[in-house]
């Protein structure tokens, strides 16, 4: 019934249930369709058939009907519920409708809201976009600001670098363009200028620079750094520029260098430098028996070989020097002697010599790089300044070196920072302005760079201050440097007067160490040092000179150390370098001037007119008195108008008017300028000389013919070392091997060895010098040499030796002192008359020796009286048993055997006999209580100006006291000669001295070769004088006369005619030579070898 089926029978039910759609109908049944009537009807039915609707009963009848019954009951209940809730349902529907309307309204609102939300969302999106844009713009602005700041910082930091780099870039660009030319200059310097002196190097570099168009070229800075040069200096290389340039040449030359090193300083540096390279080094000499073996091993194994004491280039080395390499498979070989040796590319060769005049064979010269370390004036000045500062202001020199080191380190650090800066800039990726670490690192680098620059600026300023403090001592160093080169000029006077730099440096150091240093100002200290140096130099060099040359050296020394005491041209006139033209002079001179002196006065007036005008010669009274004074050189004796002249000008006046007093004037001038008392040095003390000399430094006696120092040398050895420690050997043919053997024996045992007459074996002396270097060092050993002057004496041995001239002591007083220094107090023990007789012996010996000063008046010729004569006479005197010697016997021995044996003419024999009878007589000594008379001719030579009387004493000290009180200057009357003889002697000596000074002044011209300006300056006065003399004369235009005999002429007339013809030819030859020289000097003719030889010879005064 609920589903519209009113038939409730079983058949009807079965049919209903069999319908296909019943299940869906049941499932989709709507309980709202059950009406009240239907529910009541069905309810009645359920009540009536209640058992049928019992689930248990139905389950038994039909399993399918049971659920249907339950469904019916549920539908009834549900419909009842629906009925009850229908008002609510209606209301619910109403409300649902309202809800739907509200929902629709809501949906409309939601739509509007959605639309608004969409608008808001769109606006929010736009806002977010704008916000994002704002943020991006803000960040971009910040980034731009940061980038701009970084750019400003970077530009600011790199601005200075940009300017400097720009300048460096321009400089590097210019240098790069000039690099081939600069390297050509450097290569040329290394190839050609290593063996040249400093001034020639500068001239050649300047000339090359002009030809190549280079404005400036500094070889030293181009090829080395300050650090390298400081390191070299620390290794012992001299600090001057020449030495640094030479070191660069040595280390960069492709050829094997030959190092000329007279002072051995460069050799010591080279050995230290090579030792620091930590490479195998071999050192040898050409005299080494294993020389070839060492050379071969060094070439084979790539060692560094240093060959010392090279005298010549061994022919066996020429293939090696040429690098004549050949290939044997992969091996390079070179032939050395008869062997073919493997050549190692690491092999290096350095040849060293101390001989500045080494002769290199022509075929070897192009194969080597000659490097000359001979000292120069400026280089030596720098060395001496460094030594002075080291001694006087050691902290200053240390600070200077440290400052240079720090400055170079800072320069290197700055260079490294610049390199790092460039590397950072070059390696930076991306935008450099966004690289913060790079900017920060650049900032740090820039800050460090600025600090270093400030430090360098302060360092440079401090260095200038230090240089100013150092330069305070430069006048002393400059003076000392000039003195060394003044000494070198002495060899033009005598070849034996040569000195090396180590000896001079030793003397210089002694001057610094021994000079009294009280609390003085720097200026006073420098004056003290210069004064001490003068005295030490004169003493050291003076003992190496013969007494006749000491005044010459004194004048030469004063000229070099005090040029301010002479005006321009005065010295040249004094020594005769200026040829005065007196032919045009219109001066008239008073008649009080002696006729023999008038030409000299005319020359002085022509050369120094203002000087002569200031003398007031017209006031003849004072000048006549001055001419007559015995000591015209004394300043107080000059006329009043000449009293204001400078000392040198007064000496020029003496030279013109009183040449007989010129020697005394020069002595006084030298004494005042050098602060010495005499040019005659003190007594020779061989013990002191030996003490101050190193064992490997030979001591050389330069002797006059007949002088023999062996006796006093043996005596000195006995006093210092004891008896039996002295050896001597007279050199001659066949003695070389014995001398070498004796040398090593003496060196080993600490003996004194004297090799006599070594001038006879000059070719062997280089071997002796090298053997001496290889001897064992023994502090007691000394090698003594005796030699006469020889023009071929080896310069190396000559320069390194301590030289002592041995001749008769200059002056009677010095002679006496020398004799008594060899006689000790024990010699005077014995007979009372022994001491007196020995005094007479010494006096007589001094007289006969000093008379040689006045040749030909004193003696007709030079006789070789020596110390052996004095010793023999003393031995004879002491051998007599009686207190009174047999005078006749003594006269005979001395006349015929000792002194007389050296005399070969009757005139001098008579003089000797007269002297013997004058001094060897009984009344000259106190014997038998009778007082001695004064010695003949000794008036004025005693302690109080009286005569000399032999002391009545046996005390050595009393005799020595008397001798020390004697005057230093001898009078001719002391030797029995007239007083006016000194005028002749002085004039001859002064002429000799001025001639020697002229020789030294012109020596540089002869050695320096051709210099047009210098030669023209020296020869112009001579050429003008010759032109004046020959102008207007017809003698030069005449042809040759007829030679031979003329008919009717006397033989003497023919002889005179022939001589006149020869003289005419000589004049024509001289005229032609001078005209050729004049044309070359004017530049109108080419220079030829003959003209060059003539010009340099004339300029040198030869």
Image (spheres, rainbow, N blue to C red):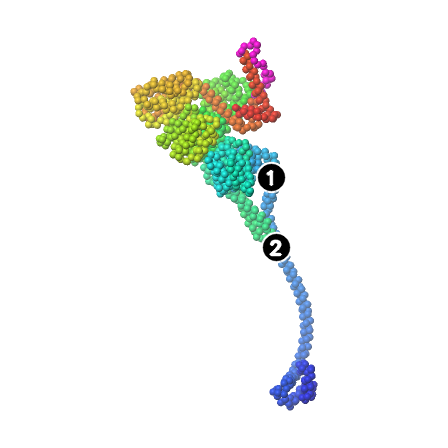
Local packing at callout 1 (Cα closer than 10 Å; few below 14, some 14-19, many 20+) is: few
Count the labels in the image.
Answer: 2
In the rendered image, which quarter contains the N terminus?
Answer: bottom right
**Left or right placement of residue 481 versus residue 708 in this view:** right
Magenta-drawn stretch contains 782:
no
Q: In which quarter of the image is residue 953?
A: top left
Residues 181 and 350: in front is: 350
Q: Main secondary structure of the magenta part?
A: loop
Residues shaded magenta: 1025-1052
Residue displayed at 35% across by 26% down: 823
For marks 1 and 2, the one nearer the N-term is: 2
Residues 133 and 805: in front is: 805
Magenta-drawn stretch contains 1049:
yes
Image location of residue 55, percent across then percent down: 61, 86
**Left or right placement of residue 675 versus residue 107 in this view:** left
Element at label 2: helix
Q: How far apart are marks 1 and 2 (CA)?
A: 50 Å
Image location of residue 684, percent across then percent down: 40, 28
Q: Mark 1 points at which residue?
A: 180
Image location of residue 881, percent across then percent down: 30, 22
Residue 336 visible in the snapshot: yes
Element at label 1: helix
Of badges 1 and 2, nearer the viewer stands: 1
- Mark linked to residue 143: 2
């Amino acid at each position: 019934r609920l589903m519209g089926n009113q038939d409730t029978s079983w058949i009807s039910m079965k049919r209903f249930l069999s319908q296909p759609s019943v299940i869906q109908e049941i499932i989709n049944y709507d309980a709202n369709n059950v009406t009240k009537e239907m529910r009541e009807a069905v309810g009645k039915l359920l009540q009536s058939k209640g058992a049928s609707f019992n689930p248990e009963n139905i389950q038994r009848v039909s399993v399918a009907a049971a659920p249907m019954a339950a469904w019916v009951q549920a539908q009834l209940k549900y419909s009842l519920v629906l009925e009850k809730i229908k008002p609510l349902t209606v209301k619910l529907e109403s409300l649902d409708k309202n809800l739907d309307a509200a929902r629709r309204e809501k949906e409309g609102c939601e739509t509007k809201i959605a639309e608004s939300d969409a608008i808001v969302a769109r606006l929010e999106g736009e806002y977010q976009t704008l916000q994002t844009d704002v943020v991006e713009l803000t960040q971009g602005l910040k980034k731009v600001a940061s980038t701009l700041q970084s750019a400003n910082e970077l530009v600011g930091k790199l601005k200075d670098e940009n300017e400097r780099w720009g300048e460096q870039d321009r400089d590097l660009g210019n240098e790069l363009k000039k690099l081939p030319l600069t390297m050509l200059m450097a290569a040329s310097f290394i190839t050609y200028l290593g063996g040249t002196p400093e001034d020639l190097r500068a001239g050649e570099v300047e000339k090359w620079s002009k030809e190549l168009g280079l404005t400036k070229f500094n070889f030293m800075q181009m090829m080395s750094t300050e650090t390298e040069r400081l390191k070299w200096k620390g290794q012992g290389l001299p600090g001057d520029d020449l030495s640094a340039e030479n070191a660069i040449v040595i280390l960069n030359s492709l050829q094997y260098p030959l190092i000329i090193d007279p002072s051995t300083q460069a050799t010591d540096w080279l050995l230290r430098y090579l030792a620091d390279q930590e490479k195998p080094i071999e050192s040898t000499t050409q005299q080494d028996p294993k020389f070839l073996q060492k050379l071969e091993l060094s070439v084979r194994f790539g060692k560094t070989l240093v060959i010392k004491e090279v005298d010549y280039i061994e022919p066996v080395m020429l293939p090696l020097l040429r690098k004549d390499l050949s290939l044997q498979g992969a091996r390079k070989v070179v032939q050395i002697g008869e062997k073919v040796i493997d050549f190692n590319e690491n092999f290096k060769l350095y040849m060293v010599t101390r001989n500045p005049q080494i002769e290199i064979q022509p075929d070897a010269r192009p194969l080597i790089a000659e490097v000359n370390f001979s000292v120069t004036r400026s280089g030596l000045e720098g060395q001496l300044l460094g030594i002075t500062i080291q001694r006087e202001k050691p902290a200053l020199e240390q600070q200077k070196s440290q400052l240079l080191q720090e400055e170079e380190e800072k320069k290197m650090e700055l260079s490294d920072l610049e390199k790092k800066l460039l590397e950072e800039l070059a390696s930076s990726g991306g935008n450099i302005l966004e690289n913060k670490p790079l900017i920060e690192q650049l900032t740090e680098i820039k800050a460090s760079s600025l600090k270093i620059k400030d430090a360098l600026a302060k360092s440079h300023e401090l260095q200038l201050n230090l240089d100013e403090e150092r330069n305070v001592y430069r006048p002393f160093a400059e003076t000392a440097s000039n003195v060394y080169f003044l000494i070198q000029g002495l060899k033009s006077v005598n070849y034996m007067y040569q000195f090396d730099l180590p000896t001079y440096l030793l003397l210089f150091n002694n001057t610094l160490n021994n000079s009294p240093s009280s609390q003085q100002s720097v200026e006073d200290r420098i004056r003290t040092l210069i004064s001490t140096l003068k005295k030490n130099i004169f003493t050291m060099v003076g003992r190496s000179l013969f007494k006749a040359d000491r005044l010459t050296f004194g004048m030469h020394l004063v000229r070099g150390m005090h040029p301010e005491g002479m005006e321009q041209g005065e010295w040249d006139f004094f020594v005769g370098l200026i040829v005065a033209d007196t032919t045009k002079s219109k001066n008239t001179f008073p008649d009080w001037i002696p006729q023999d002196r008038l030409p000299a006065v005319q020359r002085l007036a022509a050369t120094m007119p203002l000087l002569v005008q200031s003398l007031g010669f017209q006031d003849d009274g004072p000048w006549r008195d001055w001419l007559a004074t015995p000591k015209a050189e004394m300043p107080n004796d000059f006329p009043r108008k000449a009293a204001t002249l400078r000392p040198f000008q007064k000496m020029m006046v003496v030279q013109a008017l009183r040449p007989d007093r010129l020697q005394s004037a020069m002595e006084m001038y030298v004494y005042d300028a050098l602060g010495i008392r005499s040019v005659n040095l003190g007594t020779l003390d061989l013990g002191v000389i030996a003490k101050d000399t190193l064992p490997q430094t030979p001591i050389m006696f330069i002797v006059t013919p007949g002088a023999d120092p062996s006796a006093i040398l043996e005596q000195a050895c006995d006093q210092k070392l004891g008896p039996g420690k002295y050896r001597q050997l007279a050199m001659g043919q066949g003695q070389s091997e014995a001398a070498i053997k004796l040398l090593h024996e003496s060196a080993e045992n600490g003996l004194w060895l004297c090799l006599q007459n070594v001038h006879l074996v000059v070719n062997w002396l280089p071997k002796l010098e090298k053997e001496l270097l290889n001897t064992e060092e023994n502090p007691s050993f000394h090698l003594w040499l005796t030699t006469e002057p020889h023009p071929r004496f080896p310069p190396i041995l000559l320069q390194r030796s301590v030289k002592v001239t041995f001749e008769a002591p200059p002056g009677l007083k010095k002679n006496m002192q020398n004799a008594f220094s060899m006689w000790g107090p024990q010699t005077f023990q014995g007979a009372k008359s022994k001491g007196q007789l020995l005094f007479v012996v010494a006096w007589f010996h001094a007289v006969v020796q000093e008379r040689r000063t006045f040749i030909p008046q004193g003696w007709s010729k030079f006789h070789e009286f020596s110390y052996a004569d004095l010793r023999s006479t003393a031995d004879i005197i002491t051998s007599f048993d009686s207190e009174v010697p047999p005078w006749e016997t003594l006269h005979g021995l001395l006349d015929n055997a000792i002194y007389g044996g050296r005399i070969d003419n009757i005139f001098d024999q008579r003089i000797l006999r007269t002297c013997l009878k004058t001094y060897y007589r009984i009344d000259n000594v106190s014997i038998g209580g009778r007082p001695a008379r004064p010695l003949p001719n000794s008036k004025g030579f005693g302690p109080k100006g009286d005569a000399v009387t032999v002391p009545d004493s046996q005390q050595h000290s009393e005799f020595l006291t008397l001798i020390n009180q004697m005057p230093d200057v001898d009078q001719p009357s002391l030797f029995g000669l007239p007083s006016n003889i000194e005028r002749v002697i002085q004039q001859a000596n002064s002429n000799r001295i001025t001639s020697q000074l002229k020789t030294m002044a012109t020596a540089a011209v002869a050695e320096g070769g051709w210099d047009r300006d210098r030669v023209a300056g020296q020869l112009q006065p001579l050429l003008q004088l010759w032109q004046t003399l020959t102008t207007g004369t017809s003698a030069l235009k005449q042809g040759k006369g007829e030679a031979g005999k003329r008919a009717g002429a006397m033989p003497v007339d023919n002889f005179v005619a022939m001589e006149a013809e020869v003289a005419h030819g000589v004049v024509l030859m001289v005229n032609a030579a001078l005209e050729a020289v004049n044309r070359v000097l004017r530049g109108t003719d080419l220079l030829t070898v003959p003209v060059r030889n003539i010009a340099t010879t004339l300029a040198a005064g030869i």
